[in-house]
Amino acid sequence: MNNKNIIEQYDILASVTSPHSFTVVEAHGAGFKDETGKEYVNLNEINRQLGYSNLHFTKMMKDCLDSAAPEKTSQYKNRLYHHIVETTNNDFQKILLTSSGSEAVEWAIRVSRKRAGRYEIVSFWNSIHGRTYLASSVSGNPVRKTGYGPLAPGIVFAPYPYCYRCQFDESPDRCNFRCLEFLKQKIKSESSQGVAAVIVEPFQGAGIIFPPDGYLKALREWTAENGIELIFDEVQSGLGRLGHMYEYQRLGVVPDALLLGKGMGNGLHISAMLLKDIPDADPKIMTGGSGDLPLSCAGACAVFDELRKEEILDNVNQVGAYWHEALTKLAQKFSCIGDVRGRGASFAIELISDQESKKENNRLREKVVGQLQNHGFLPGQWHSSIILRPPLSITHKQAEDFVCCLERILDIEGI
Ligand SMILES: Cc1ncc(COP(=O)(O)O)c(C=O)c1O
């Protein structure tokens, strides 16, 4: 039995993950080559911020494995903490390294509850916070929850500001954040008035949805006025994906807890919860995790080293500016594109049946993505959107080739 068959036969995820399984013979940045010589660009890879075969990352792995004598094991954690503290300008005074984003989410919620002496959590429709029990309970994604009840109690959901499909038929320039008023109303009428925290992604990574300017600032003000903690889940928005280190810094909104993960280890399991402080008794129950293993810390150090050199962030900003312009032009040319949204290395191209009804066109999305895959481009998908979340080392040429390929496909589809 070859490797492909055994995965297809035994892997629980085989039927739901990409039908493409590759024997990769060469990989670099966002691209790789299979055994037939065919080249691919991975446009949906949030676990590898630096991409494949990054020389510095590989060297750090090797150095760490060669030198992992027990007395030296904290050297990488030490370096990593310097990176985190310096890049967050000391906005947070306590750090817990965890092994997954879900684990960081769980701890942030538990700590906020303990500190507040209240237990209710506010979260948002379409959010993704993880796969474990509490993390999936606070996620606004029905697929992960259906049939798995009872879910964790005490969670109030509100619509995330998805302006292209506003729940209130408003437009962001004149809505006065009606959805935020609705959130407050929901809490008033649905909760026991014991909200400990609001957990929110500064942009929703699954659907690449950005709140309108000022929304998160208004949310910060309201939470602060009401003694409610604000948890920013920057597992996707942090560490360069949007063209700067952290989204909270661009927004000028400092949350009470900041969560990092995914690309932080460039493929290794490491994530982090950053807090302003922590109740005295809590560290005792947090011991025993495996988030701070030397190899993972070394991997995360390599990611920070590279991001702090700034060439990668410059690249993300250039690719993002190009995609914004080129994809907006495509949206003007093809009426099947309802919305193009994104920044940096995160874009969504939402396909619709017609401009008036904005009906999601999943059939077209499936067809277009299938053809993109045949041409070697591997994007993600969310509802009727084509999702682009490549490694941050994607080249301008790869970004351009993707747009040309998409245009050719849409030209042939004649829409
Ligand atoms: C924003 C966000 N938070 C948390 C998580 C959970 O992270 P993990 O899969 O590492 O548990 C994810 C996973 O995709 C995510 O996108």
Image: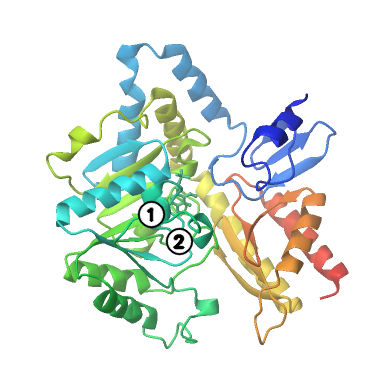
- Indicate if the residue with disc 2 has its beta carbon within 8 Å of ligand 1: yes
Task: Pinpoint residue 277: horizontal percent, then vertical percent.
Answer: 17, 46
- The numbered mark at residue 127 is 2
- Give yes or no for contact between labels 1 and 2 (Cβ–Cβ under 8 Å): yes
- Quarter of the figure with the N terminus: top right
Q: Is 285 situated left or right of 240 in this image?
A: left
Name the quadrant containing residue 336. Answer: bottom right
Left or right position of 3 against 321: right
Q: Residues within 10 Å of mark 2 (few under 14, many from 20)?
A: many
Quarter of the rendering containing residue 342:
bottom right
| Residue 6 placement (x, y as % from top left) | 71, 29
In the rendered image, is residue 24 in sight? Answer: no
Q: Quadrant of the C terminus?
A: bottom right
Q: Which residue is located at x 27 percent, y 79 percent? A: 189
Viewer-nearest residue: 229 or 191: 191
Q: Amino acid at mark 1?
A: Asp
Percent from the top left, x then y, of residue 134?
36, 51
For label 1, the residue is 233
Of residues 15 and 350, which is closer to you in this image?
15
